[in-house]
Amino acid sequence: MITKKKFVWLNIVWRREYLLAIILLIFLGFFYGWTRRGQPVEAPLLLPSAISGKTIIIDAGHGGTDPGAVGRSGLEEKTITLDLAKRLKRYFSRVGVYVIMTRERDIDYSQMPEAGALTKKRRDLLYRVRMANESKADLLLSIHVNSFPQSIWSGAQCFYDSKTPGSKALAEAIQESLVTRLGPNRRKAKSVDYLILKATTMPSVTVEVGFISNPREEELLADPEYREKLAEAIFYGTAAYLTEQAQGRAAVAVKPAGAGLSAKVYPELTFPALEPGMACLYFATPNNEDLKLTPEMRPLPDGDGGNKLKKARVILEELARGPGEGSALLPCLPGGDWVKNLRLEGEHAVIDVRSELGAFINGGGASEFLAIYSLVNTLAANLDLEAVTILVDGVKSATLGGHFLLDEPVRPRPELGPAGTEAEEF
Ligand SMILES: [Zn+2]
C-alpha cells in the first residue's frame, strides 16, 4: 500500500514537471525559430514566466449580419478576422495563455439586451465590451481589416485608446512586430476613439491587419500562409509587450470600469487662419504613412454672405464636391446630397446624414475615421464650432462603418493636418 501511495505522489510531481518542461521547450522552439529567420530583427528575449498563465481576450471584428469591409473579390472582413482570431488562439494556447474568444462562429450580438443600447451595432459592441470586462482578462486584442475608398493605401496598423494604461505600449509592440515581420510599412500605432477600446478596462488594441481595398493586400489577406504570418507577428508583439511589462518597462495600471467614457480633457485646438470669403476643407493625404487630413483653401461661391447656417450648407456642398481640380488630395466623403438636416446651436452643430454614406465607407476603420473627421474638422474650422453631433437617418448613437459609435458630440482634431502636431493625450 505504501509503495502505491508513493507511486501516485511521484506520478503527480512527474506530471507537473513534465508540463513545465513542455512549456519551456515550446518557448525555446519559438525563440530558436525566430532567431533562425535570418531577418534583421533584433529579437527581444521573451520571458515565459511573463506570458504563461495570462488571460487574453481575442475579438474577431464584425460577424453575422455585419460583414465589415468587403473587398473587390467579395472577400469579407468578418471571415478574415475570425480565421486570424483562431490562428492567434493556437499560438497563445501553446504557451499556456488562457484565451477567451468573443466569437468562434459567424455570429453577431445585435440581439443581446444591452442596457442603454439604441442601435444593433451598439448592442453588438457593448456585449463584446461586457464579455471583455467580465472576463478580467489581462489584455484585449481586437482584430479588424481596414478599407478606404481609394485603393492606394496598404499596411497593417494598430490603434489604441490613449486613456487606458498599457494600451499604447501594447499597440507599439505589435506594430513593431508587424513591420519587422511583414515588410515595408511606415504606419505607426495611433490613438482613436473606437468604442471597444474606450470602454474596456484592460490594455487593449485594435489591429487593422491590412487594407482589403488594396488589390495586392486583398490577395495576401485571402492567403492562409499570409494569415499565419500575421497571427505569428501579432503573437510575438504581444509576447514582447508582456515581457516588457514584467520587466517594469510598460505601464500596468488598470483604469476603472467606464472611465474611458467619462468627460475627457482636450488639448487646445488651432485651425489654419482663414481669409474672409475663403473655406477650409479637410481631405485625406495621398501618402501611405498615416491617417492624416490636409486642409484645402478655396474661395466660397458667395463669399461669406448670408447667415451662418447658409454658409454651413455651402461648405458641406463644397466638401461633397471633393478636392479641387488637379489636387492630389483624396475625398473622404462621397459626392451628392448626403445631408438630410443641419442645425446650429451656438458653438455646436447637429448634422443628420443619410445612411448611404456607409456604402462609401465600406465598413473600413480608416475610411470611417477620416470621413468623420473630414466632416467635423471642416465644419469646426469654418464655423468656429466646438463639437458636432452626427445622426444617421435621424438616429443617435448610430455608426457609419461599425467602429465608431456616434453617441457623443465629436470634437474636431485639427492636429490630423500637417500644420499641427499629434496630440497623443487626446
Ligand atoms: Zn472592422
Image (cartoon, helix red, strand yellow):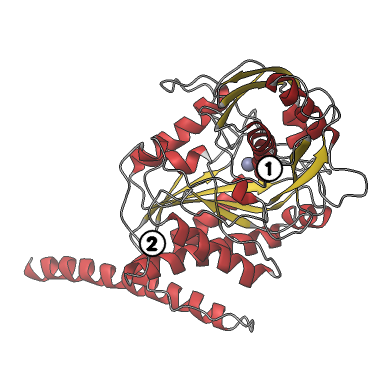
Relative to 138, 399 lies left or right: right
- Which quadrant of the figure contains the N terminus? bottom left
Residue at 74 percent of width and 57 percent of height: 154
Q: Where does the image place residue 235, in percent across and percent down from the top left?
A: 51, 63
Q: Residues within 10 Å of mark 2 (few under 14, many from 20)?
A: some
- Which residue matches tag 2? 96
- The kind of residue on which mark 1 rests is Leu
Relative to 345, 244 lies left or right: left
Kindly report the distance in space between the C-alpha atoms of the residues bearing marks 2 and 1: 39 Å
Q: Is residue 104 visible?
A: yes
The residue nearer to you, when weighing 148 against 305, is 305
Instruction: Name the N-terminal-most of marks 2 and 1.
Output: 2
Element type at marker 2? loop
Element type at marker 1? helix
Q: Nearer the viewer, mark 2 or mark 1?
A: 1
Determine whether 149 is above or below 5 in the image. above
Q: Where does the image place residue 337, in percent across and percent down from the top left?
A: 81, 22
Q: Residues within 10 Å of mark 1 (few under 14, many from 20)?
A: many
Residue at 57 percent of width and 68 percent of height: 177
Q: Where does the image place residue 25, in percent across and percent down from the top left?
A: 42, 76
- Which residue matches tag 1? 370
Q: Is residue 83 visible?
A: no
- The kind of residue on which mark 2 rests is Gly
Q: Where does the image place residue 105, in percent across and percent down from the top left?
A: 57, 37
Assign ligand 1 to one image quadrant: top right
Quadrant of the image occupied by residue 380: top right
The residue nearer to you, when weighing 266 against 309, is 309
Quadrant of the image occupied by residue 394: top right
